[in-house]
Image (tube, rainbow, N blue to C red):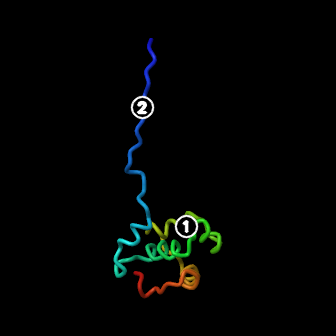
Amino acid sequence: MGITQRTITPNSRHIQPKTEKMADAIADEHKAIGDWIRVKRQEKNLSPYHLATEMGVGTALVRSWENGKGQPDKQQLDFLTKNLEFSLGNAR
């Protein structure tokens, strides 16, 4: 019985590109609310964790908004527009 060495190469499809470059590439008129949240959060140098902590919600909830899998409710939107300084008129 012999011993063999196995090399495992990770699939690069699971690695996400830099979000800053992605956010810059999206035209302003086509940004969804999640895109605006991500861009404004990054402009304020906040991580999803820090924004979630300030809002009193979970980090997974903030990430779901940014990924388009969820939407903030009215109270959360009010907080975001006030503290991240963006207008809902620009987001869809």
Nearest the camera: 40 or 33? 40
Q: Residue at x 63, y 74 (%)?
A: 55
Q: Is residue 14 above or below residue 79?
A: above
Q: Is residue 15 above or below residue 52?
A: above
Task: Judge left or right: residue 47 versus residue 9.
Answer: right
Binning the other alpha carbons within 10 Å of mark 1 as few (below 14), some (14 to 19) or many (20 upward) gives some
Q: Residue 5, image x and y in percent?
A: 44, 24
Q: Residue at x 34, y 77 (%)?
A: 27
Q: CA distance from mark 2 to mark 1?
A: 37 Å
Q: Residue at x 57, y 70 (%)?
A: 46
Nearest the camera: 66 or 50? 50
Q: Which amino acid type is marked by label 1?
A: Leu
Q: Which amino acid type is marked by label 2?
A: Thr
Quadrant occupied by the N terminus: top left
Residue 83 numbered mark, or none: none
Residue hosting label 1:
61
Disc 2, SS:
loop
Q: Residue 32, image x and y in percent?
A: 40, 76
Residue 7 numbered mark, or none: 2
